[in-house]
Image (spheres, coloured by chain):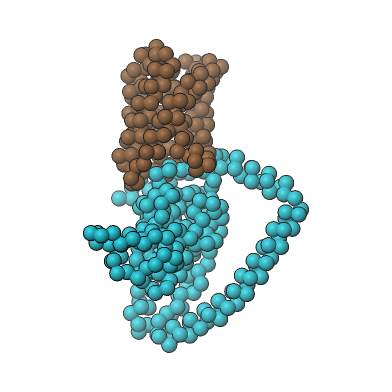
Chain colours: A cyan, B brown
Amino acid sequence: MNYFVPIRSVLSTVVYPIQTMAALPKDISDWVANYFQSQRQLKEKNTELEATNLLNSVRLQRLKALERENIRLRKLLGSSFRLRERVLVAELLTIDLDPSYQQVVIDKGQRYDVFVGQPVLDATGVMGQVTEVNPFSSRVVLLTDPSHAIPVQVNRNGLRSIATGWGLGESLQLENLPHNADVRIGDSLVTSGLGGRFPVGYPVGTVVSVNFPQGKAFAEIGVKPAAQLSTSREVLLVLPAKMVEISKKSPDTDTETETEAEAER
Amino acid sequence: MAENQKSHGGIIIFTIVFAMLLMLLPLPDSLRFFRPEWVLITLIYWAMAVPRLVGVGFAWVVGLLMDVMMGGAMGVLAFSYTLVIYLVLQFHLQLRQYPLWQQALSILSLVLLVDIVTVLVSPTMAGWHVWLPAVSSTVLWPVMYSLLRTVRRTFNVS
């Protein structure tokens, strides 16, 4: 069924110059705006960034301690622990694609070992995954695309579900949750890591609406994506992490190793 | 003669590539749905004016490139552009005789044809906004027509 993948890859390479050219006006205007920034603005920005950096590094210290504690606890439980993922920074091409699909083009491709199914994050959450890799660029399908679904869990109680996209400007929907599901407005959702595509524990979104319609089998739960899907320029491509095998006894370990192998393929 | 023909092809391809750039150019969200089908109306103009140079095969290639560029399913625009250009080639003599507003109405029906094909294969529930490009293309047709006619006369494409 994949006969057309190479053809599409060649054609994508043919149109890539046109795509970069279409992104030029925005790039140039950004560059000009950047170039003519006043010193005062830069200073302000710098102070602001330094402050955030300080806050972040303080939080990171605590996170490191927590991570170590987590490894120790998991050791006690006899399950394995996934190391922190490494990331590759890519930039979006500022072009508009077909509005009936939710996708973007990024400027890293085969030459950077991008692969199909690779998770894509931005500074605030999960954006989507790579669907097509070409020599110089790749195509990323966003969480809001109608063909996209992502396994999630509620951060508060670990309830697992699947969030599917509903198209432009619509919120994500949690599928197949019964009427007695413990989900509230404001709950934050993180990736559950089931399915092996997305790493565990990255923010996906917050619940913005919960309805239990009479006469329907499942609840209707709307989720606002955490990532800035329409404004992010820089994105992070997650590289598969190395596993630390602590014990082979628990069934948990086996499944996680399997998904790892799948991700590396 | 051969060299002459080559330069003609060149200017047609140049306008098509320019139209592709206009299709990709980022627009604010409010204007995004009003984006005219630049490539399609450029193709229609050339098929109408110089059917000797722009045929069904050319439309298919442009459509295929558009599919890949816009990220849709491969073949959707290729098929619909081919269909439209076939119709234009059938009726190009009548189309040339029409007054501009009547031409614009023909363009409306042709762009709607492309939109219908796109909607039929689209994974999303189509909202009312999918029909907006047809309207903006129609409104824009007289401008595009005179512009491309100027281009054609300047470069003496026939």
- The residue nearer to you, when weighing A31 against A8, is A31
**In which image quadrant can residue A159 be found?**
bottom left
Number of marks present in the image shown: 0
List the single residue furthest toward the bottom. Answer: A76
- What residue lies at 49% left-to-right and 58% top-to-bottom? A227
Measuring from the top left, give residue A101's x and y in whole percent.
40, 46
List the single residue furthest toward the left. Answer: A215
Q: Is residue A60 left or right of residue A98?
A: right
- What residue lies at 67% left-to-right and 67% top-to-bottom? A51
Q: Is residue A23 above or below residue A141?
A: above
Measuring from the top left, give residue B45's x and y in whole percent.
44, 22
Q: Is residue A104 above or below residue A243?
A: above
Measuring from the top left, give residue A127's x and y in whole percent.
47, 57
- What residue lies at 36% left-to-right and 27% top-to-bottom? B110
Q: Is residue A19 visible?
A: no
- The residue nearer to you, when weighing B89 against B114, is B114
List the single residue furthest toward the right. Answer: A39
Image quarter hosting the C terminus of chain A: bottom left
Q: Is residue A137 visible?
A: yes
**In which image quadrant can residue B48 be found?**
top left
**In which image quadrant can residue A46 be found?**
bottom right
Q: Is residue B139 left or right of residue A65?
A: left
List the single residue furthest toward the top. Answer: B97
- The residue nearer to you, when weighing B128 against A233, is B128
Q: Is residue B99 left or right of residue A45?
A: left
- The residue nearer to you, when weighing A241 against B137, is B137
- What residue lies at 35% left-to-right and 46% top-to-bottom? B124
Measuring from the top left, give residue A213's x and y in whole percent.
28, 59
